[in-house]
Amino acid sequence: MSFRAPHIAALTLRGDSVRQIAGKIRALERGEPIAGIVDRMRGY
């Protein structure tokens, strides 16, 4: 039997994540593009 764990590059810090998400929401509200969008047709 083998043990498998998910890959985690780093811990997610709640405060940092909330600031990043809020910043992206504000950018969308202003009609600005946001980074980090994955095009599923193109892949990563």
Image (cartoon, helix red, strand yellow):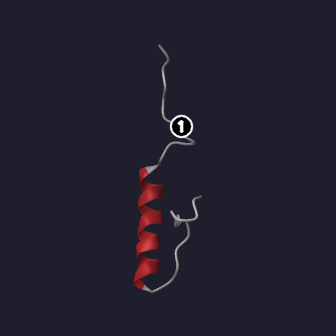
| Disc 1 residue type (three-letter) | His
Left or right: 44 in relation to 12? right
**Outermost residue, bottom direction?**
31
Residue 35 percent location from the top left of the image: 56, 70
Q: Quadrant of residue 29?
A: bottom left
Residue at image location 46% in from the left, 49% down from the top: 13
User: What x and y, as percent, mark residue 2?
Assistant: 50, 17
Q: Nearer the viewer, residue 35 or 23?
A: 35
Q: Tell me the SS state at disc 1.
A: loop
Please name the residue shown 53% across and 39% down the image: 8
Q: In the shown orientation, is residue 35 left or right of residue 25?
A: right
Image position of 2 with respect to 37: above or below: above
According to the image, label 1 marks what residue? 7
Q: Residue at x 41, y 60 (%)?
A: 18
Which residue occupies the foreground of this view, 13 or 42?
42
Residue 1: percent from left, percent from top: 47, 13
Q: Is residue 44 left or right of residue 28?
A: right
Report which quarter residue 21 is drawn in: bottom left
